[in-house]
Amino acid sequence: MVSTAARRRARRLSNFCQSAQPASGTAVRGLQVSEKFPAQGYKDNVLSDCFADAQRYLLDHYLDVDRAHVLMLAEQGIISQEELATILRAIESLDVEAIRGAEYDGSVEDLFYFIQREITRGCGDSDVAGKLHTARSRNDIDVTIYRLYLRQQALDLLKVCGELHRVFLDLAAQHHESLMPAYTHTQPAQPTTVAHYLLAMAENTGRDISRLQHAYENMNLCPLGACAITTTGFPVNRHRVSELLGFTKPTRNSYGSIASVDYFTEQLGATAAMLINVGKFAQEFLLMAMMEFDVIRLPDGYVQASSIMPQKRNPVAIEHVRAIASKALGQVLGVMTSVHNTPFGDINDVEDDLQPLNFSAIRDAIRAVSLLAHSLAAAEFNLELLRERAESNYITVTELADVIVRREKIPFSLAHRIVANCVKQSTAAKTAISYDMLQQAAKKELNRGLELSHQEFEDALSAENFVAVRTIYGGPAPTETQSALAEQRQAEHGNAEWLQRARTGLSDARLNLENTIRVVLEES
């Protein structure tokens, strides 16, 4: 028996619900309220923007998924050949550009349903058209089309990274013996060469390429057939749709196919690492282009004049590299923040609202890398000034300390102290370090002079000698940078071949899909 108190609570709840529920189509404090989907507020703030984003990024991929899926259904005997032909004709007869330019009117939820409505009209039979959606879900469709778009972007990013890598190598090849100062803590440190410097950037870029390749390989797996999250009771062939769409293979676990986001977060992580490198490179070259440094000159096509100062030659292209890379990195962080604490399953947080930000981040990364590569391709270094600075500011004295250690058989810390005292004395006197100055400093520390000859002293302070003796693996000696360049050239060729294989795989799959459709339509 229901208690009196329970009945009173039920009446209060009923009265509350009746008073709180506005009539359909009425306004509450100026906001339109409707029981009909989509409500104006939802349409304006969610569906309209998502529809436009899908038109821009995903329309073609929706259609490819429809094509591959319906072919597989017929091959598996789930639908008839006649039904296959009817659906394919409807798909191929769609006015794709009209769909791409259509205004969202709220008559359907989103682009997926818009396309399905147009296919149904093309079929002339809703029952036949409805069979297209057998054994699939919006869930596996969405994660598939996202991967289809992202993998093309990934290859475009790898292409421009390869171009930047090649630019660094081409420049390095010209400068194995071009001296320059290396900097630590933004201060002159030791002599090196322009080739050594640029090869460091090339190796960084090569590692970025390796990370992006690995991310692509994990992304290029097909979730289609996972359906809602647990696959289907229909005898679908997931390997076949994967093949038709150019994926390497299907994703293995259907739950993870829908729930996992690492297919794009890994790509973004690799992109973030690359963008940090690009930002550091851009900062370097902007400083080098300052008149106070004046050691690099960009081609005229990548600098701008001032509207008021006739003398200005502004390296704006590199400024844009830095700005675009920063923007892209900000978008990457926005995506990562949006997904880091979301449920492990199908959830809107990682779909329509988020993916365009993902796409935009990669697009801006492509722009930044491409612009840097083009800006540097014909850049010129002020070799005379770089050499002069490589021989200034005491930056060769590490080798002097090393020579003393080898010649005198004393601890490096002691040799370091002797040379440091020379530098202090020389700085105070505003003169260069002399042989006599060194001998005096040695006597204070050793109570004797050095056996080091005057010629050995002169050689030790030579920037050219400093570089020449550093033949250790990874060092700046010309023989070593030539060896490093040869290794990087091999990596460059390997990366180009990898990219060609990936692009060929997609183009071959595309041709296979088109030919399969053509045969079906010709035979029907």
Image (spheres, helix red, strand yellow):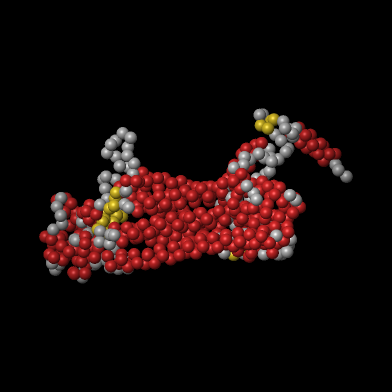
Residue 397 at x, y percent in the picture: 21, 60
Q: Quadrant of the N terminus?
A: top right
Q: Quadrant of the C terminus?
A: bottom right
Q: Nearer the viewer, residue 87 or 130?
A: 87
Instruction: Residue at the far front: name it.
Output: 522
Residue occupying image coordinates x 25% and y 59%? 178
Instruction: Residue at the far top: name it.
Output: 29
Residue occupying image coordinates x 32% and y 37%? 306
Q: Nearer the viewer, residue 140 or 245?
A: 245
Residue 105 at x, y percent in the picture: 66, 39
Residue 232 at x, y percent in the picture: 71, 61
Give the left or right position of residue 186, taking residue 440 as reference. right
Residue occupying image coordinates x 28% and y 36%? 310
Q: Nearer the viewer, residue 30 or 478?
A: 478
Residue 320 at x, y percent in the picture: 40, 45
Residue occupying image coordinates x 31% and y 60%? 172
Give the left or right position of residue 72, taking residue 454 as reference. right
Where, by quadrant of the figure, is residue 131 drawn?
A: bottom right
Give the left or right position of residue 273, taking residue 310 as reference. right
Residue 72 in view of the camera: yes
Q: Nearer the viewer, residue 511 or 371?
A: 511
Give the left or right position of residue 413, taking residue 355 as reference. left
Where, by quadrant of the figure, is residue 106 drawn?
A: top right
> Total number of numbered labels?
0
